[in-house]
Every structure is written in structure tokens, then in C-alpha cells.
């Protein structure tokens, strides 16, 4: 083929596609221009995820009448003058491509008036057509972008749905608002108020306005300086964690960035303070001299390169770690390690529970097997005296005494048996925790976490062995949303393995004819709905093993709940089944099933030692 130079219109559209990938990219570029123009108020209005229209209005510097034409030319910018300026970049935008790229693939109406003039400009652009009129407006700039990609059908065809685009835009505005608490942001989506921040330069108030009271009350402020680094913002208390990294915000010089190395350094600062598979929340701005940064790595400018990166990461980790240790009121920390079922107790007590050394990963040990193993041990059994709580009804003494019965303790027997041996049942606290007292320690059992572990192992083994029991019920028809219906039908065999008997009934409706039995209890058909709602529809369901595990984990939500009063018989059964689990120390989600606290620790609390 012959080599040819593309015409200007084609070249401009290709270049625009590199900068503007969707409505979110448009809004990002326009808001960054507003911020660079020293705006203190920015209003965003979006219709149909931005596909129909998006309007950004600010009270910033505005554009001079004589410079309006230049604003939409490629590489026209007020941010830099020469290449060396990139080494000391302080603005969010700088390449001079945003307005030109947006204009090449949409219809634009701009109203602007500079603070320096008493007359403004009305600009309308559509393709090669430009109309400019002198008008009087409020100080600042308002840009309305309509019909994005109207002249690039291929790009328009593959855009996301409006609801999905709106979610992306909401996330973007959250990022920008959190990085600029001195600016009041307002976002309306399809006429519905979504975000409004005070703009009073108080980040904590901004956090409250976006995430609400629970989040705002569980973060602590940080200001740490170790030149050339300055860290400011808020970090979550060790007791307030999430099972994903959604609420981790990193800003470099007030620019939102996505940097896994920085995020990892911050998480490592919480080591031994939070449970495994849990993640801290944080909203941090890291100030670094501009000459140490390269923000021109990616068109979205969310990727950066840092000079002396290793040193910077070390300083970040050190600063966060000091603040976490200083402010933490958590005296018992846990670290649950995969495949070892090990729990580390309070650091300052330095008391550890020995990891399990022998477990079958495929079969739950039955009580009979445990007894047989015990009888074949060569260790001498020692009879321990019964310990009876005087507050317990005598008729329950037989049940409670099981916890004090002698056990053959060997290296191959679960450490959990050692913990519960020689303890006295005290009672149930807040209808959520079960308390046992030993000679110089207590055990506090989380009844929900313990029952979840029992359920998880029971269901997992039966699913893998194909031995899950299904109870036939009177058929129940349930109509689902299209996405839920597709998720269920596409993975019908997996739900069948868990114990559900289903049929397609048309019109996004399923017929439930059978439900699983967990621990000899027939489940309600509503469990299926709970599972579907609990599963993220965006998960890669092609990963059968992972998807199956997620279904099983969700099924465990039918475990004994907190705030549920248990009888002595139920408590007895719960502890007995927990001691037979392969991994009894945590629930399927990583939370401890029980905590061991020493008498020494209590005496320290009360300043006795």
C-alpha cells in the first residue's frame, strides 16, 4: 500500500480518541481546567451518563475575548511555555489537547467571561463550524458538551450504558472533590442531586458530605513531614477496614493517581493491626517536589513516575506506621495467615497461639475419627476436676462439663482443643459473644463467625463430594432482573451443586423446586435471592472454582446471627463442631472465631501491674 498523509480532520479525530475515551474523560479534562483557573465552585450536570450532554460550570478566571479562538486549537495552553516547564509542573492540565480533542468529536457551547473584562464570549462549535459572539455573563466559564462521538460511529457503538457511565463520573467527581476540599463541588445526574461538598477547605467535612457519618467518624487525621515528603489527610482506624480497596484514595500534589506500590506501602504500615483479607481506608495527599515527578506517563495522567521511588515508599510507610501506632486504641490485634490457621494475639503481651501442624484439607474430621485418634495415642491421660459455674442451672451441668472433660493433648491435636480444655462456661454477652473462663485466661467466641466457619466447611466438603442434600419444596416462581437472571442461568449447574433445584420459566423468571439442607436444617428459598444479591455480577464467572467458592461463602450468611440468644445445648453443639473444623480460628471472611485474653492483660488494663 502507498504511504499517505492523513487529512487534518481524520488525524484530529484519531488524536482526540487517544485523549477522550468516554464522557468521564471529558468531564475530567474540563474540571481540571476549572481547577487550574482558580475556581472555588464547580457545578456538573450529566444526562444519560454524559452521552446526551454534560455541562461544567465554574467561577474561575474565565477566558479573555481575544483568546477564545486559541482555546480550541491543538497544543494551545496557558499552563506551560517551554519543555523545561514540565520539570516544575504544578497545574493539573498542561498539554493543550483537551478542548481541541473534545471539539473534534462533539458539539460544544461555551460561555465565558474573564475577571479582567466586562464582556464575555459565547462560542458554538460543531465540526469545522465556529460561531463566536460577545455577550455578558457571570465571571467564569460554562461548557456544555453534547452528542459525544456523534461523528465516530464505531466509538459511539461501543460506549457503556448510561448507568455505568454515571457511576464512573460519580467516582471521578469524588476523587476530585477529595483532592480539592477548598472547592465546592455539585453533581447532578439525570436531574438527581448526587454529590455536594462544602468547599470550606476542611477535608474532614468533605469526607462527611461524600461518605457519611460512619466513615467520617472512623478516620483519623495525619500530618507527617520527612523532607522532601509531606503526607496529609485521613487514615482509617485499624478497627475500621473493608474487604476491598474501593475506599483508598491517593493524591500526589492534589492529583489523583493509581499507584499499587504506594497503596501496598500504606497497607504494610497496618501490618499486625488488621485482619488478613481486610484493607484499610485512607484519603491521603502526598506532596513531593515537582521535579521528582513525571505525570506525563499516560494520557489520563493517573499514572506517575517518581524519582528515588524506593526512598519515597519507605518514608510513606514509616509515616503512616507511626500514626497508626500512636492513635490506635486497639489492644488486641490479629493476623490470620492463610494455610496455617494461625492467630497472633495482642502484640504487647507477645502471646501466640501455636499454628496447626496437621490438617486434612479435604475432609472434616468427625467426632468418631477424633476419638479413635485419641485412643491410639501413647500419651497418658490425666483426669481434671470439673469446674461448675454456680450461676448455671444444675440441669445444664452435664452439658457444660463437656468443656472441662479431659482431652488427650498431642502435637497432632488442634490447638483449639487445648484452649477450650479446662474452661468454665460463663455466659453469653450481648447475645453475640460466648464467654469461657480458664485458670489464667478467658475465651470470647463470636457465635456468628464460629457458625459461619462450621457451615463453610460443611458445605464445601459436600459440594466437592457431590453429596449436598436437597429438600423438595412447593414450587416457587421468582422474577429476577435481566442481569441476575443471566447470572443464574449461566451458572445453573453450580447452584445445583450447592443444593438448589431450578427451572427456567421465561420472562426472567425461575422456578425453585428444591433448596439445600445445611446442618440438618432446610433452607428457605429466599437464600437463593440473598446469594444472587451478594455476588458481584462483574465477577469473572468463567473462573469456576472462584465463583463456586463465592456462592458457598454467600450461603454461609444463614449462620447464627449476632443478637441471637442461644441455649446451653446450642452453645455446646456450636463449640463441639468448631473444634472439629479444619480451620477453626477464622470465619470464611477472615474474622476471628474467638479471642484469647490473659489474666495478665486484664491486670495491666486495671493498672495492677
Image (spheres, grey):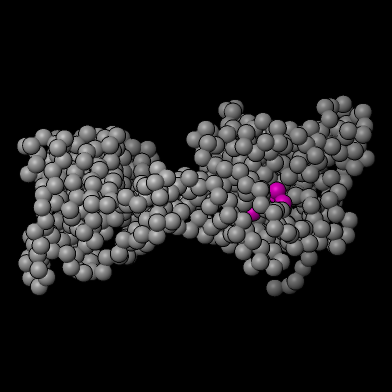
Q: Which residues are magenta?
A: 253-257
Q: Position of residue 553 (x, y in %)?
A: 30, 50
> Vertically, is 417 above or below 377?
above
* Residue farthest to the front, as pictured: 608
Residue 422 among magenta residues: no
Front-most of 23 and 182?
182
Quarter occupied by residue 563:
top left
> Vertically, is 324 above or below 5?
above
Q: Is residue 307 visible?
A: yes
- Left or right placement of residue 88 versus residue 526 in this view: right
Front-most of 235 and 259?
235
- Left or right placement of residue 396 versus residue 139 in this view: left
Quarter occupied by residue 75:
bottom right
Q: Position of residue 290 (x, y in %)?
A: 77, 58
Q: Residue at x 76, y 58 (%)?
A: 289
- Left or right placement of residue 312 versus residue 37 in this view: left
Q: Position of residue 324 (x, y in %)?
A: 54, 51
Numbered-mark total: 0
Q: Residue at x 53, y 36 (%)?
A: 217
Front-most of 418 and 284?
418
> Vertically, is 152 above or below 182?
below
Q: Residue at x 62, y 37 (%)?
A: 204
Q: Position of residue 318 (x, y in %)?
A: 60, 59
Front-most of 10 and 299?
299
Residue 255 among magenta residues: yes
Quadrant position of the N terminus in the picture: bottom right
Q: Is residue 484 visible?
A: no
Q: Residue at x 67, y 44 (%)?
A: 179
Magenta span: chief secondary structure:
strand
Amino acid at each position: 500500500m502507498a504511504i499517505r498523509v492523513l487529512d487534518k480532520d481524520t488525524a484530529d479525530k484519531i488524536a482526540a480518541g487517544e485523549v477522550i475515551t468516554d464522557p468521564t474523560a471529558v468531564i475530567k479534562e474540563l474540571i481540571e481546567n476549572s481547577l487550574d483557573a482558580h475556581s472555588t465552585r464547580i457545578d456538573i450536570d450529566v444526562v444519560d451518563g454524559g452521552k446526551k450532554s454534560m455541562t461544567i460550570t465554574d467561577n474561575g478566571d474565565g477566558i479573555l475575548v481575544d483568546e477564545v479562538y486559541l482555546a480550541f486549537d491543538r497544543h494551545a495552553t496557558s499552563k506551560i511555555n517551554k519543555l523545561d516547564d514540565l520539570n516544575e509542573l504544578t497545574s493539573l492540565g498542561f498539554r493543550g489537547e483537551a478542548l481541541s480533542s473534545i471539539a473534534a468529536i462533539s458539539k460544544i457551547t461555551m460561555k465565558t467571561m474573564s475577571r479582567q473584562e466586562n464582556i464575555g464570549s459565547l462560542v458554538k462549535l460543531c465540526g469545522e463550524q465556529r460561531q463566536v459572539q460577545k455577550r455578558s455573563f457571570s465571571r467564569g466559564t460554562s461548557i456544555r458538551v453534547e452528542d459525544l462521538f456523534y461523528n465516530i460511529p464505531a466509538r459511539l457503538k461501543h460506549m457503556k450504558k448510561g448507568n455505568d457511565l454515571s457511576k464512573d463520573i460519580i467516582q471521578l467527581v469524588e476523587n476530585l472533590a477529595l483532592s480539592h476540599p477548598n472547592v465546592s463541588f455539585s453533581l447532578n445526574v439525570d436531574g438527581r442531586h448526587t454529590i455536594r461538598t462544602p468547599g470550606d477547605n476542611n477535608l474532614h467535612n468533605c469526607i462527611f458530605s461524600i461518605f457519611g457519618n460512619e466513615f467520617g467518624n472512623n478516620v483519623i487525621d495525619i500530618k507527617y513531614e520527612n523532607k522532601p515528603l509531606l503526607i496529609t489527610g485521613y487514615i482509617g482506624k485499624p478497627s475500621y477496614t473493608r474487604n476491598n480497596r474501593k475506599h483508598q484514595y491517593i493524591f500526589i500534589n492534589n492529583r489523583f493517581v493509581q499507584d499499587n506500590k504506594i497503596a501496598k506501602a500504606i497497607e504494610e504500615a497496618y501490618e499486625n493491626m488488621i485482619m488478613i483479607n481486610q484493607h484499610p481506608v485512607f484519603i491521603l495527599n502526598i506532596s513531593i517536589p515537582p521535579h521528582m515527578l513525571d505525570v506525563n506517563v499516560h494520557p489520563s495522567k493517573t499514572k506517575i513516575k517518581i524519582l528515588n521511588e524506593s526512598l519515597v515508599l519507605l518514608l510513606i510507610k514509616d509515616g503512616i506506621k507511626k500514626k497508626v501506632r500512636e492513635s490506635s486504641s486497639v489492644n488486641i490485634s490479629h493476623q490470620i495467615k492463610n494455610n496455617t490457621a494461625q492467630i497472633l494475639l495482642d502484640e504487647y503481651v507477645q502471646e501466640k497461639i501455636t499454628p496447626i501442624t496437621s490438617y486434612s484439607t479435604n475432609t472434616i474430621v468427625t467426632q468418631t475419627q477424633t476419638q479413635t485418634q485419641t485412643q491410639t495415642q501413647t500419651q497418658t491421660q490425666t483426669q481434671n476436676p470439673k469446674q461448675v459455674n454456680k450461676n448455671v442451672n444444675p440441669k445444664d451441668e452435664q452439658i457444660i462439663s463437656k468443656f472441662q472433660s479431659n482431652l488427650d493433648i498431642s502435637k497432632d491435636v488442634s490447638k483449639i482443643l487445648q484452649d477450650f480444655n479446662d474452661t468454665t462456661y460463663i455466659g453469653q454477652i450481648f447475645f453475640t459473644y460466648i464467654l469461657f473462663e480458664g485458670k489464667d485466661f478467658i475465651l470470647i467466641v463470636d457465635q456468628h463467625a464460629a457458625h459461619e466457619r462450621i457451615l463453610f466447611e460443611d458445605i464445601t466438603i459436600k459440594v466437592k463430594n457431590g453429596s449436598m442434600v436437597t429438600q423438595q419444596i412447593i414450587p416457587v416462581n421468582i422474577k429476577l432482573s435481566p442481569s441476575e437472571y443471566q447470572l443464574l442461568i449461566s451458572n445453573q449447574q453450580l447452584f445445583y451443586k450447592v443444593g438448589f433445584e431450578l427451572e427456567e420459566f421465561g420472562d426472567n423468571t425461575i422456578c425453585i423446586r428444591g433448596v439445600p439442607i445445611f446442618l440438618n436444617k432446610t433452607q428457605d428459598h429466599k437464600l437463593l435471592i440473598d446469594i444472587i444479591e451478594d455476588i458481584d455480577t462483574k465477577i469473572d464467572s468463567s473462573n469456576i472454582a472462584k465463583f463456586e467458592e463465592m456462592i458457598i461463602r454467600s450461603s454461609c450468611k444463614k449462620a447464627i446471627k449476632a443478637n441471637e440468644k442461644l441455649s446451653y445445648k446450642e452453645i455446646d453443639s456450636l463449640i463441639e463442631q468448631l473444634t472439629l473444623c479444619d480451620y477453626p480460628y477464622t470465619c470464611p471472611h477472615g474474622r476471628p472465631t474467638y479471642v484469647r485474653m490473659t489474666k495478665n492483660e486484664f491486670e495491666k488494663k486495671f493498672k495492677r501491674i
